[in-house]
Each structure stands twice: as C-alpha cells, then as structure tokens.
Amino acid sequence: MEAGLTLYSYWRSSAAYRVRIGLNLKGLAYAVTPVHLVRDGGQQHAADYAALNPQELVPTLRHGERVLTQSLAILEYLEEVFPEPALLPADAGGRARVRALAQQVACDIHPLNNLRVMQFFDREWNVPQPERDEWTLHWMRKGFTALEAMVAGSFDTGRYCHGAEPGLADCCLVPQLYNARRFHLDLAPYPTLQRIEAACLALPAFDAARPENQIDAV
Amino acid sequence: MEAGLTLYSYWRSSAAYRVRIGLNLKGLAYAVTPVHLVRDGGQQHAADYAALNPQELVPTLRHGERVLTQSLAILEYLEEVFPEPALLPADAGGRARVRALAQQVACDIHPLNNLRVMQFFDREWNVPQPERDEWTLHWMRKGFTALEAMVAGSFDTGRYCHGAEPGLADCCLVPQLYNARRFHLDLAPYPTLQRIEAACLALPAFDAARPENQIDAV
C-alpha cells in the first residue's frame, strides 16, 4: 500500500501553492493540514509544527514517516519518487534551464517579499505600508524582467516555460504572478510570462491548486 | 575533447563560492572570469554580462556553448553531467534532505543579505549601516538556528551535513558561514555547523575555493 501524502499548507503561501501544483500535475492524492500564518500569532510557530519544520515556514510534506521541507526540494523529491509525468526535461541542459527559472522565483523574488520580511519591516523598522509595498514591487519587477528576458529570448520556451509540457518552472512562476496581482503590479511588460500563466491556469492541475480553491481560503 | 568550463565569479560572492566548491569536489578544471560587483558601478550590470545572465548576478558558468545560471541549478547540472564524486546521496529521502538544507541557505538566508539588498536599503531608504548589519545578522541567526536544529537532531548528519562525504549542503553552508564571520556573528549557538565547517575547510576542494584564495581577491 502506498504511503499517504499530507501537505501542511496555507492557501495564500506561494511556496505551498508550488507544491500543490506539482502534486496535482503528478496526479497524486494528498491530504491538506492548514497552517494559518497569521492566526494564533502564526500557527507555523507552534511547537508541534516547529518540530516538523524547524524553519517554521510552510510548506511541509509528509510522505508516510518522511518529513520533507523546502518547496523546491519537495518538488524534486516528487519527481524522483513519482517520475511520471515529468516536471523536468530529460536533458541536462534543459533541466538546468528549468531549475534556474524556478530558482529565480524561489531564491530571488519570493524570499524578499514574504510575510516574515514584511513583519520585520513593520515591527523592527516601522516601515509604512506604502514603502513596504514599493519594496515588494521592486523585487518583483527586477525578477520578472529577468524572467521575461530569459523566456522570451529562448527557443526552449514553448506553450509553457520549457516546451510543450508544464513543469517545475511553471510551478514557481504561476504562484509568483498570483502574488504580483495581489500587489497590483503592472504586468504589461511581461507578455510572455502572462501568456504562459494563462496556459497553465487553463489546466485542472493548476486550477485546483489556486489559493481561492483551498479548504482554508477565506 | 571535453568542452571547457568558465566560471564568472566574484571572490566574495557566496553563491559563486558554492559553485567553486562543487567544481573542485568533482575535480573539474575551470577558468575564472572575475566580475567585480562594485567596481565600474558593478560589472555584473555591463551589457555583455547581462546578455549572459539577465539577472545581472554571479555566478554564471559556461560549459562549451551552454550558459548556466543560478548556483544550485549549476551544481545540479554538474551532478548530472559529472556524476562522480556525487554531491547528492543515492536515496530520494537523503537527496531531499540535502537539497532542503542547501535551499535553507540559498533561499532563506543569502538572498536577504546580498549586495543588491544592502544597496536598496542604503540608496532608497537611507538605512544606516548598523541597522543594515542588524538586518543581516537577524536572518543569519534565524537561518542558522533552524539549520543547527536540523543537523544536530538527525542521525543522517555525519562528518559533513549528510554522512561521511561532503556534498551540496556543505557547498552552501561553508560560504554562508564565511559571510557570517564577515559580519562578526556569534557562532557559539551553532556548534554542529562549526564542526562541519572545520571538517570541510580541511579539504583541499574547499580550501582552494575560499574567497581569499581567488585570483580577484584584494
């Protein structure tokens, strides 16, 4: 019997959203344990959750007895344990390209703009909301400008970030564009990213993973 | 004939340092093209470099005609093209653990503290140096605390982050500890990380990758 999968998730977390897409693309059934990032002072800081994930961040994935953290590490794990359909192309050059696109989001946009950073600015430096928003938009613009250049300028780009099948880069791009819309970022300079986003969201795997379709959405 | 490897590197960049370690661990010869991150307004912003790396960040690795960006994507590429000695363990659970440790550094510590963030604080918000340093130390402490918990609390930890051989997580940990020392972070709360760092730096592959041993070190 296959070991069960449980995702510790928050509906609006874009890192959790990435993993939901990956699970859905692979057709894997999973239970969701919501972790509310604001309520109760942040349920990710509760002792039982911190024991699973010492970073006190979402997502965490349980696969049987195994506890997995970090969204990209989780997606790579799913790729290795459940190889079909693949989230990465077969060739090393293509795999490097897809991982680089994914990491541009996961390393160089999202970590600068997530909840704990906003809380630091608010609590430690009293940065007003408009300036916090300008910070967020600044890093999104920088990141999306580079992403747009990389996908618009490559023959490897297809209907999705890499070729004709959705994969790891799309798992990261779509949630980051969701965040961008929350902050009313002008997406006009990124036509290729918008085209790929539309193609992705037309797929049931992406649609079911959307924040507003989660059991803990409010 | 094997295609040549050229690393676009800056001696103090911890992301470039990760890739230097990986190349050395695999015994790969490579040329270095220094990219000075401050001189000339930042040589990473020059048009010829930006054409290679639209993010205008280091490192970039050329392998023959192929251009690779994002340090972890580069290390995964090296792992696939030059599999021996391995930077990742063989089992999916171990690989996920090593990737998660690496990503804790590459996603959740380093991007918050790198040069472009410091420049934003200085130029856009006029944040004084002591407060910028406190920001840097804050995210290092948070990140190292979680890393220490994960390595100290696991039987998978050995002489190195994972078992008896150095790997991907060590490639990320050692440069981040180098950064920590630059900022005079008190490392006493992280005895396991310090022990692993010492084991790593005793290896020629790590020693040769140290910032102070680079051709562009000043």
Image (cartoon, coloured by chain):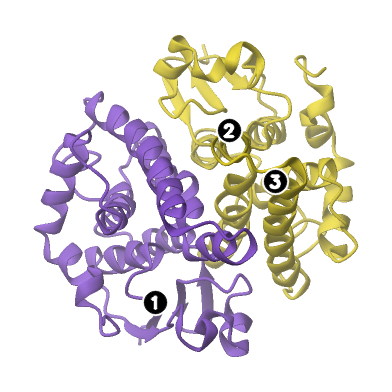
Chain colours: A purple, B yellow
Q: Secondary structure at mark 2?
A: helix
Quarter location, residue B164: bottom right
Q: Residue at x 12, y 66 (%)?
A: A204
Query: The disc numbered 3 marks a residue on which chain?
Result: B
Q: Secondary structure at mark 3?
A: helix
Q: Nearer the viewer, mark 1 or mark 3?
A: 3
Q: Nearer the viewer, residue B32 or A8?
A: A8
Relative to A208, is B124 on the left or the right? right
Reading the image, the residue beneath label 3 is B132
Relative to A142, is B196 on the left or the right? right
Q: Are marks 2 and 1 in contact (CB under 8 Å)?
A: no
Location of residue B48 in the rendering, given as x and y in whole percent from the top left corner: 45, 10
3D distance between C-alphas at marks 1 and 3: 32 Å
Q: Nearer the viewer, residue A152 or B19?
A: A152
Reading the image, the residue beneath label 1 is A9
Relative to B146, is B112 on the left or the right? left
Q: What amino acid type is highlighted by mark number 1?
A: Ser
Q: What amino acid type is highlighted by mark number 3?
A: Arg
Q: Residue at x 53, y 78 (%)?
A: A66
Reading the image, the residue beneath label 2 is B123
Q: Earlier in the sequence, mark 3 or mark 2?
A: 2
Q: Nearer the viewer, residue B27 or B209?
A: B209
Question: In which quadrant will I find the C terminus of chain B?
Answer: top right
Other residues around mark 1 within 10 Å, as few (<14) / some (14–19) / many (≥20): many
Judge whether residue A42 can be spotted in this image. Answer: yes
Q: Nearer the viewer, mark 3 or mark 2?
A: 2
3D distance between C-alphas at marks 3 and 2: 12 Å
